[in-house]
Amino acid sequence: MKLEDIKTIGVVGAGTMGQGIAQICAQAGYKTILFDINAQVLEKAETTTKNNLDKGIERGKLTEQEKQTALANLTFTGNTLQLSCDVIIEAIVERLEVKQSIFKELADINTPDTILASNTSSIPITQIAAAVPNPERVVGMHFFNPAHIMKLVEVISGAATAPEIAETIKQLAEKLGKTAVMAKDSPGFIVNRVARHFYVEGLKLLEEGVADIETIDKLMQASGFKMGPFELMDLIGVDTNYSVTTSMFEAFHYDPKFRPSRIQQQKVDAGHHGRKSGKGFYKYD
Ligand code: NAI
């Protein structure tokens, strides 16, 4: 599949990442189908999309006509059968077995030409691809949060990914206004491998009683980071961030430097998932 053959894009999962990914695909002129199993999440995604587009107009980055065209390009659905597309970008929970199961389903619905991309932060693409009959069309397309603003996309080739598929996805990312970087398949790829220690060490400082959440965040900001680790985990989703650490800890053969934090696990268990749930390390209105 070449860039010019792509007309329809399916996005699976309408949460923190899927909503933003679908929005930019629709803005770039693609017929975009956003799917989630949770009707409430779909409703919220529709409201967030409208709000984001309105903000774009306020800031002079978008016209009313462009907003209407983007919205006309977008379909929100809870029916997987509508996901017959040229490219599908998966953005559901960070768990291998759940991703493999949806990839199998997507492979059944679509032709072998459909490119199946995953927005996974850490799970090896080779493992996800092992679940489908044509693994050469499976590729990583890793956006950053918030997806409609952050410029970087990591394009990850698994062991079976065809080079021309990775190239098409790189061109697609560029068409969406992003800067695409090719990466090899390795747990956490490039950015999350380096950034993991930002969270893990922040949590260790907290566990050891060296400093409190606010102090750590303020100091990291003062040293030049846009956000401290706790603020950032709340933005990412404390649950998603925890799943990424857990997946990398397992993938690196339980190397203690990636060990997930008990404090973070408790937050996840308590449903304190960050901004999206109204409470995480901080409280939100
Ligand atoms: P989220 O928890 O905000 O959203 C996940 C959505 O997937 C939920 O709405 C849920 O209802 C839906 N879902 C679960 N199982 C499903 C299924 N079988 N079919 C359809 N929908 C299903 O998660 P988030 O944060 O958007 O993460 C999604 C993926 O993106 C993960 O792989 C994560 O590692 C990755 N990612 C997350 C980033 C972040 O900052 N949150 C940044 C970059 C990548």
Image (cartoon, rainbow, N blue to C red):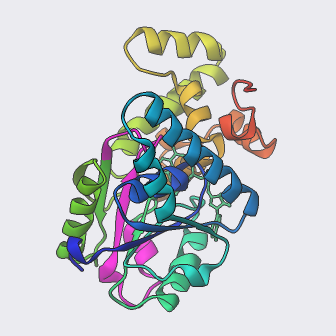
The quarter of the picture showing ligand 1: bottom right
Q: Residue at x 71, y 33 (%)?
A: 263
Q: Position of residue 6 (x, y in %)?
A: 30, 74
The C terminus appears in which quarter of the rendering?
top right
Which range of residues does the magenta coloring cover? 125-152
179 vs 219, left or right, is left
Q: Residue at x 28, y 56 (%)?
A: 173
Closest to the observer, 49 or 184 = 49
* Residue furthest front as drawn: 65
Q: Is residue 279 magenta?
A: no
Q: Position of residue 143 (x, y in %)?
A: 40, 50
Q: Is residue 147 magenta?
A: yes
Residue 110 versus residue 233 in the image, above or below? below
Question: Which of the 4 image quarters holds residue 185?
Answer: bottom left
Q: Residue at x 27, y 62 (%)?
A: 172
262 vs 270, left or right, is left
* Residue furthest right as drawn: 270
Closest to the observer, 170 or 79 = 79
Residue 10 versus residue 251 in the image, above or below? below
